[in-house]
Image (tube, helix red, strand yellow):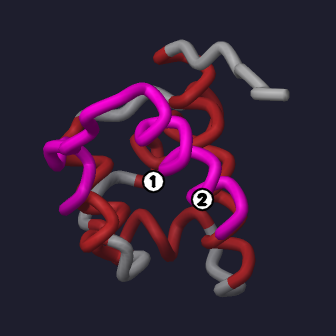
Amino acid sequence: MIELTLHTPASEARELASRVKKRRLALHWTQAELATRAGMPLSTYRHFEQTAQISLQGLLSVASALNALDDFHSLFASNTWSTMDEMLAESQSKRHAR
């Protein structure tokens, strides 16, 4: 059976902010330390963790500070699916890789 999950921009933003926070904590960094490394005010970073709202430039700066900027390279890469089965197979292989 195929599992479908409803993704909304708000839910994806919250999940992303949560993953950033988990990575920050895994590095034993404070919010202030990550904000400094990202070149942004602490209040801006704190607002991101609390509300999941941040500018694209801010998000890229945070990703760079966490050495995760390369993760953005495939964000809008074109897919070459010919059929729905190919798309589903790719989706399932990505899920199993996690």
Residue 37 image position (x, y, % from top left): 34, 77
Question: What's the residue at 64%, 38% (across, down)?
Answer: 15
Picture layout, residue 38 above or below residue 33: above
Query: Disc 2 on helix, strand or loop?
Result: helix
Asked whether residue 46 appears in the rendered view, the answer is no
User: What residue is at 47 percent from the left and 70 percent from the top?
Assistant: 34
Q: Residue 5: percent from the left, percent from the top?
A: 71, 21
- Magenta residue span: 73-98
Q: Earlier in the sequence, mark 1 or mark 2?
A: 1
Residue 27, percent across and down? 65, 86
Quarter of the image for the C terminus: give it: bottom right
Horizontal side of 90 relative to 39 (left or right) equals: right
Real-space CA distance between mark 1 and mark 2, rounded to the nearest whole angstrom: 38 Å
Residue 80 within the segment the image draws in magenta: yes
Task: Work out whether 72 lies above or below 92.
Answer: below
Instruction: Identify the mark at residue 89; answer none if there is no mark.
Output: none
**Residue at the spot x=73%, y=81% of the render?**
26
Q: Nearer the viewer, residue 84 or 66?
A: 84
Residue 90 appears anywhere in the view: yes
> How many C-alpha atoms fall within 10 Å of the one at disc 2: few (<14), some, or many (≥20)?
few
Disc 1 marks a residue whose amino acid type is: Leu
Q: Secondary structure at mark 1?
A: helix
Label drawn at residue 93: 2
Mark 1 neighbour density, 10 Å: few (under 14) some (14–19) many (20 or more): some
Q: Nearer the viewer, mark 1 or mark 2?
A: 2
* Residue that appears at 19% across and 62% down: 73
Image-quadrant location for residue 12:
top right
Q: Give the labeled residue for mark 1.
A: 42
